[in-house]
Image (tube, rainbow, N blue to C red):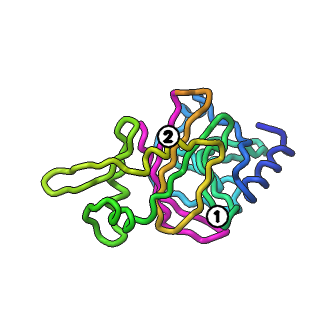
Amino acid sequence: MKKISLLIVSAALMIGFGCAQLLRAQTPDDKGAQPRKRSGVFTMYALDPLARTLCFNDGKEGMTIANNQFGNRCSDLSYSLAGSGVFVAGIEVNRVAAIVDLGTANQLRERYGFEDADNGGIGFASLRLEGNKITILQEDNTSPVWQPLKEGPQLFADVKASANAPIKLGHIYLVRIADTKDKTFQHIVKLMVISYRPEESVTLRWELMTK
């Protein structure tokens, strides 16, 4: 745990901007102690110091209070009030990230031509990782046919510390997190914003795409 004074500054920055890379990254021991979860629904609260961030290892809040001390447990994604509300990833030490906004389910359907109902789940469900490429459904008549996601390369080219993207209701996002020192570490996650109360909370459906 860092000193209380530094933690207070860190918390304040995360509320106001969220882009300062001030958190210690989780260690392999930290990860091993957490039950693995690959998907779920989570609500992030702007004014909750614990649930302001999300951990993709177990789908729980990223910050913790233990023994009267406040600190980072595993913060992969943060909700910041900067810019009328943004997601921030790559906020832990040595972590870099990219966030790609794919638009709504209907916009995905229009761009890629698969059949789906209005605000349907086929586009989100079909997003998958094949090696270092993201693919999405093209058609599903007798058997599924996949096509490359045109926005996918941005995940691997445009990584930086404290990557951010505006929060938009109904939008689907891809998030990639890597580590500048641990080349074996990588999270690729798909998110859908299913509820958003600006300056208060955002609820996500999320799924980890990497194994």
Q: Nearer the viewer, residue 111 or 129?
A: 111
Q: Residues within 10 Å of mark 1 (few under 14, many from 20)?
A: many
Q: Quadrant of residue 198?
A: bottom right
Residue 112 drawn at (x, y percent): 32, 59
Q: Going by the picture, which residue comes out furthest to the left?
A: 142
Q: Residue at x 55, y 36 (%)?
A: 178
Q: Amino acid at mark 2?
A: Phe
Provide the secondary structure element on which disc 1 rests.
Answer: loop
104 horizontally vs 179: left or right? left
Q: Nearer the viewer, mark 1 or mark 2?
A: 2
Q: Amino acid at mark 1?
A: Gly
Q: Is residue 51 visible?
A: no
Write the start and end of the magenta stretch as one range.
184-211
Residue 113 drawn at (x, y percent): 28, 62
Q: Residue at x 29, y 49 (%)?
A: 147
CA separation in Å, label 1 and label 2: 24 Å
Residue hosting label 2 = 156
Position of the C terminus, as image quadrant, is top left
Residue hosting label 1 = 85
Q: Are marks 1 and 2 in contact (CB under 8 Å)?
A: no
Q: Nearer the viewer, residue 64 or 193?
A: 193
Residue 15 drawn at (x, y percent): 73, 58
Q: Residue at x 79, y 55 (%)?
A: 12
Provide the secondary structure element on which disc 2 rests.
Answer: helix
Q: Residue at x 50, y 59 (%)?
A: 204
Q: How many marks?
A: 2
Which of the marked residues, 1 or 2, is nearer the chain's N terminus?
1
